[in-house]
Structure formats: C-alpha cells, structure tokens
Image (cartoon, helix red, strand yellow):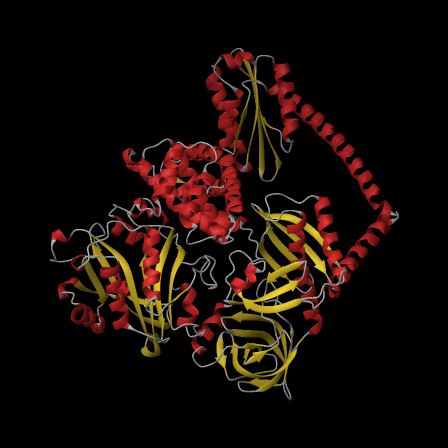
Amino acid sequence: MPAVPESLSGNQIRDKFLNFYAARGHQILPSASLVPEDPTVLLTIAGMLPFKPIFLGQRTPEFPRATTSQKCIRTNDIENVGRTARHHTFFEMLGNFSFGDYFKEQAIAYAWELSTEVYGLPSDRIVVSVFREDDEAFNIWRDQIGIPPHRIKRMDEADNFWASGPTGPCGPCSELYYDFHPELGDDNLDLEDDSRFIEFYNLVFMQYNRDAEGNLTPLAKKNIDTGLGLERMAQILQKVPNNYETDLIFPILKKAADIAGIDYATADEKTKVSLKVIGDHSRAVVQMIADGITASNIGRGYILRRLIRRVVRHGRLIGIQGVFTPEVAEAAIALGEGAYPNLRDREASLKAELQREETRFLETLERGEKLLAELMEKNPKEIPGRDAFVLYDTYGFPLELTQEIVEERGMTVELPGFEAAMEEQRVRSQAAHETIDLTVQGSLDKLAEHIQGTEFLGYSEPVTTSEVTVILMGGNSVESATSGDRVQIVLDKTPFYAESGGQIGDRGFLSGQDSLVRIEEVKKESDFFVHFGRIERGSIAVGDRITAQIDRACRRRAQANHTATHLLQAALKLLVDEGISQAGSLVDFDRLRFDFNCPRALTPEELKQVEDRVNTWIAEAHQAQVETMGLTEAKAKGAVAMFGEKYADEVRVIDFPGVSMELCGGTHVSNTAEIGAFKIVSESGVASGVRRIEAVAGPAILDYLEVRDRVVRELSDRFKVKPEEICDRIESIQGELKSTQKQLEAIKSELAIVKSEQLLTDAESIGEFKLIVANLGEVDAESLKTAAERLLQKLGNGAVVLGSVPSPDKVSLVAAFSKEVNAKGLQAGKFIGAIAKICGGGGGGRPNLAQAGGREPNQLKQALETAKTQLKDGLK
C-alpha cells in the first residue's frame, strides 16, 4: 500500500483529481459561476447544482461522464466558521459525474483507487457508510473492495439518502471517512465523532424517481453524483489540525496576522478564530465579486455585504485599524488565480469594491458599536428588536452581526420586534429580479421525461406552425382549455423569444382553426419555452397544430432597445472607463436600463458625450454581423462577455464591426440605422459601485417626447410664459418661496419667545436657583433653542429645559444651564442626552447649552417630568 505523500499542495490535489477522472473518460468542465442558473437558490451551494437539469431530465448531457472542481458558497453554518476544524462559507467541491453511463460498482472502485493509490491514504484509515437498505453498495465495499464489514456502517435516510426535493430523482449515498485515530480500535465506531473522523468523499447513487405519494420507481438511466471536499483532503494529506492551516487558506491568515502585528502560532484561541474568519470570508468575497456580485441589502448582495463586514469587524477585534481588506484580498487572489483566472482579471474592480464597502462600514461601525454598547448596558438580557433594526438600517449592522456581538455577552436579540420593524420599512427593488413561476417549473419537472424541449426559430421566422405539447392551468397539466382560461402553453417549436439576458419576452398570438390565444409573456424554464396567455376565442388542446405569430411591432421595439444597450456599453467603455462592465440590464418594449460597475456618478458632460456617440453610430448605419462560434474563439476576437454569466461552448456573437462585439442571445436590429435615435433619461446609483442609466431608443422615443411635450405645454399654460421661459419662472418662484420661509421661521421664533416668556411667572425656586421645565407644543428645534437661551438670560442663575413635537414622529429637546448650575456638577450636554433616551433618541452639546431629539413623542411628558425631578435633586 502506498504511503501518504510527504506533501501535496491544494493545487496538486485538485489537479490529481481532475486528471485521474480525465484519464478514465471524464470531460473536465470549468467551474460554474457562483451565480446559479437554478432560480431556487441564491448561490451555487453544491458541485452538482450546474448538472441539476440533467439529473431532472430537463437537459441532454453533452458528455456521458464529467469531472469538475466547483466553487461553492454556503452560509447556513456561518456561526461555526473559525470555531470548528472544517466549516467554511467558500469551499471547492471536486466531483465526478456519470449521466446514465457507469453506476455503483465503477463509482466505488474509482473512489477507492483515487483515495488509496493516488492520494495514498492507508486502507485501514478509511471507514465507509452506506444507506441502511443499500445491500448492493454494502456488498461491493465488502466483497470487491475488501473492507471489513465492521468498518462499513449502515446509516439512516437523514445521512445517506439524497433527494432533489419531495419528488423527483433520488437515491442512496455512500460516504468515505478518514480515521485520524485508528489506535482507538474498531469497537463501536462512531462516525459522528468529528474529533476522530472526517467525511471526505460522498458518492450519490441516483437510481430512483419518487412520486407525490412517496413511491420509489427505478430510473431508466441511473446517474452518479459525487463530491470530494478539497479543503478536507488538504487537511488530511498536509497533516494539519484543521482546514484553515492548509496552504489553501493559511497564507491569507498569515497576511491578516502580519497586518495586525500578530504571531498566529502564539495567539490565543479567540484571536485565532478571528483570523480564521478573515481567511475564510476573504476567499468567499473575492470569488463572489469576481463573479459579478456587488454588495447591497438584498439577495446575493446582502450575503456579500454581510461577509465583508464580518471580515472588517474581526479585523478590528485583533487590532487592525484602517482599511485592510484589499491587502488581504491580494493574498486570496494569489492563491486562487491559477484555478480561477477571473480573480486576477477583475483585480482592480474587486479591490475597489472592497475598499468602498470597508470605508463605508468603518464610517458607521464606531458609532454603531457605541450605540450597541449603550443598548447592552440598558438591556442586560435582551436587545429590543426595533433597536437591533436601527443598528441594521442606520449603522449597517446585519442582524447576524448584532446577534454575534451580544451572544459574546450571553445576551439575545428579540427577533419578532426586528422582523416587525423590517416588514414596516421593507423597501425592495424588484425591477432587476426575474420572476420565476416555481409552480410551472415544478409541473414541467414532472413532464420532462415525456416531452422534448422547445426549438426556438425566432431569429429568422416570426411565424411558425407548431404543435401544442403541454397546457398548464394553475400549475397543473391539463389536456385542453377553453375561452376565458388563463394558460401556460409549451410548443414543440416557437418564434417567441423567451425572457432572458435582460430582454423581455415577445408578445403575440397562437391561432388555430377556431381558436385564438393572446400571448402576454414568454419565459424559459430549462429547455422549455412557456407561453403565458389567455384564450380569447374557442378552445385549445394538447396535440393541436397551431400558428404561432409574434407581435412584430413589439419585437422591433425590443430589438432597437437591445442593440442600443450594446452601443451604450461600448460608448461608456470608450469615453468614460475601459474597465466598465455590465452589472445587469433590462430591455423592454418602451425603455432600456443598463447597470454597470463604476465608482462614481457620471458628469452631465460625460452623459452628453455618451449619448452623442451612440447617436453618431446609429446615423453611420453599421451593419450587424451575427455568428455562432466557439466560446474561446469569441473571447479571442474580443467579444464582451458579462461577468458571472454562464456560457455554452458554442456562443452567439453580435458584432457591429468597429463599434461593439458582444456575446448575446437576444434579438437585434440588422443595421444601427433602424434604431433611429437614442436618448438618456436618467443616471443614478443603485448600489455601492454600481450606476444605472435609463434610456429610450427607436419608436419608444416618440412616446417619451410626447409625454415631455405635454408636460412642457401644461407648465407653459399654468405659468403664462413661453416654454423657454419656464426655468426662469420656476427660479423666481423658488426665490419667493425661500424668502417667505425665512419670514415664517422668524415669526415662529418670535412666537416661541413670546410663548416662553409667559413661563417666567411659573419659574420654580430651588434655593438660589430658578428652574423652568416645559413643553412648547409644535415649536421647531431652532426656535426652541432661541427660547431657552432668552429664558436663561432673564432667569440669570438657573436651568431651562424645553421640549416640543415639531412633527408627529419627532421630539426636540434643549437644555440651557447657567455657570452656577454647572458648578453644581450638572452639564447640559450629558443631562439632555440622557433625558432624550426616554424618547428613543439622544444628543448632547456644551455644558451650558445642548440640544437632543427623539422618535417617541408619547414619551415627552415622562421625559420632562424626569428632567424636573433630576434638576431639583441636583440643585438642592
């Protein structure tokens, strides 16, 4: 038996795995993006995820065997990262896959040969598990591989049975475990003991289909799906106590330790945990950003922001001051660029994104930490949920970060209150979110074995004769539908473009001899084009031959806007920054939207130059050249690809020579002159480092100009001026309004003073001091301050505390103390800040004059009573 190699690097482990399976007929495929095609998950969470449509029967495999090293992200166990030996957010899953080719016997033989002969693991250190009912796998391990029966453990469904969901393909698993302590003997082996055993290879035998009643029937084509954890194998072969000290991660820890001036070897356990978190999360964030994810407060962007902020916070915990994530990211890029070249390709924008996010977080972190410390002092057992939401909403603290901090003090966060506050203020941008009808998708999953995918003919044929293969109503498959029914229809072939690549799906009609279906939208679910519509006349049934016809006017509008989007990107790269890359887009019938990575807003001059350049290209009448070619060839020719997008080996290239060349499956004009004109409507920021341009092109410009013309005419009529004089008139009105507001503020201030001076007769005497505490109603903060200063002047030796409610959700407070009051140990800033907390706020200022505010007007009465009591006690 070969000995364990002296040392194999992480890269060597990866290469040996891929080369082993390539030599056995497996096609080496590149890792898929962390942004998955599967709409049910936010991130790629498993090595098999890119092949899920094949396992579900929705896609025909290009190769019978494949092998990959797939990058994955999981955050469900994020609290264990750095605390256990092998939990990660980012990890690489080495996999070998068989699509109806070999099965259990060969998969087990391969796994054993790889483990013992290639990686050199001693056979007496490997224990395997099988599903409790899988006698076939048990017998292969025992009789063909030669593992003693007592080292083959039968385990329950929770551990050793894989399923894609409640229904569909599924099957038993067999797992390989490495034994760190064989000297403990083979009696009562407990594979749950992770101090002794580590699972490093999982073999899934996909052999059944499970129906809605839970019945299992054998699949006609049985599949193999495996996963070997790269980090875990590195720990085993490099003989280190945990995954973090392998060469895949440790250099990042070392870089963070050097920045902090720490020696990892002699650091205490708490410091090591922070360094491990930084190492793990840094790998995750550089891969996510490289795949086109940007930080935000929703979806994938929220996960990225949360990970970056955990890195920053743990950096602070070990003493790092200032921005450091770009420097740590360099270590992560250097480690990963060999397997993932896009890390180095996107180095500049990647580091810029980290710099922006860290700088933004540092600006609020100190204030947030101070507020959280005050909250923990005020609420020693549980932080109110609404306070936790303020930390999230105002100071950028993810809930999980707040929980992590308070748990270190043995406290909790009141979750119902947080969720209620989140729901009340939830504002989510849905424009860039693709709506997925999972009911429709689930129904198609069940039918996938019985029907073929849809053939798309719409690039050249606006009308086709097609056969109805599926009709869905309410997510259920039906044989026919009649007038008035809302349906989803799948055809064997279609001219309708399905929503994808940012372009909206076509509209049009399906017509039969006596039937008419209006198609309102088209979506693609795996290989099926789903036509959503309403039957306006007659009936339609599965098997009917119908005429499918797109709305050509809508198609022309979409084509104009889509080509204009390509020209826009080319102009931005040419005139603003060559490094600009697409971060999302929308091509509709009446508008276009283009999101792009850029750290700053564009100037009006730049926007004008971009718009002029696009219109120049339109007027120059550039002819489109559309060609299908290999992905490598397309990139070599300079075709622009969208970061994070997954492309097939054969791609469609849209080329307007000398202007723009992009990989794109959308529909386009044949000549730029067909667009007619292009107009930028707006430019704005949508996320950190991401800008958005909204524009119109082609026929949609007439609609846009019509609206603008109507508005101008209405304003001209109302102001009784010519259109060209409207701006001057508005400026004049604004000047008048500003003057009126100043007069109003002066009047308010005078009224506040008059009202407050009536309080002088009610001033209380506390020994040598005079005291006024009162509510002035709806007085604004500035007038309240003026009133307090005037009252104190007239009191002389004393203290004035005034409150008001200038708006329904706002409290204003002010304190004015004489020098004699200060001499008694009372300072206005500290005093009014503490009082404001009663109203859900805070504030402060100088010892003699200070202002504060709050969010709970119903607590003002209590706050003023407390102020009066404390002043009386302090002035005695």
Does residue 555 appear anywhere in the picture?
yes
Q: Farthest residue in the bottom direction? A: 513
- Which residue does the image show at 33% across and 61% down from the upper left? 227
Q: Is residue 563 above or below residue 415?
A: below
Does residue 411 appear anywhere in the picture?
no
Residue nearest the viewer, comparing 247 with 846: 247
Q: Quadrant of residue 55?
A: bottom left
Q: In this view, does 793 lie above or below 858?
A: above
The reply, left or right, for residue 569 in relation to residue 428 is right
The reply, left or right, for residue 429 in relation to residue 252 is right
- The quarter of the rendered structure image containing the N terminus is bottom left
Residue nearest the viewer, comparing 455 with 769: 455
- Which residue does the image show at 63% across and 55% down from the upper left? 594
Please provide percent x and percent y for residue 62: 44, 72
Q: In this view, does 624 lie above or below 730?
A: below
Please provide percent x and percent y for residue 108: 25, 68
Please provide percent x and percent y for residue 425: 54, 48
Residue nearest the viewer, comparing 23 with 779: 23
Q: Quadrant of residue 797?
A: top right
The reply, left or right, for residue 698 in relation to residue 586 is right
Tell how many labels: 0
Please provide percent x and percent y for residue 607: 71, 48
Residue nearest the viewer, comparing 132 with 777: 132
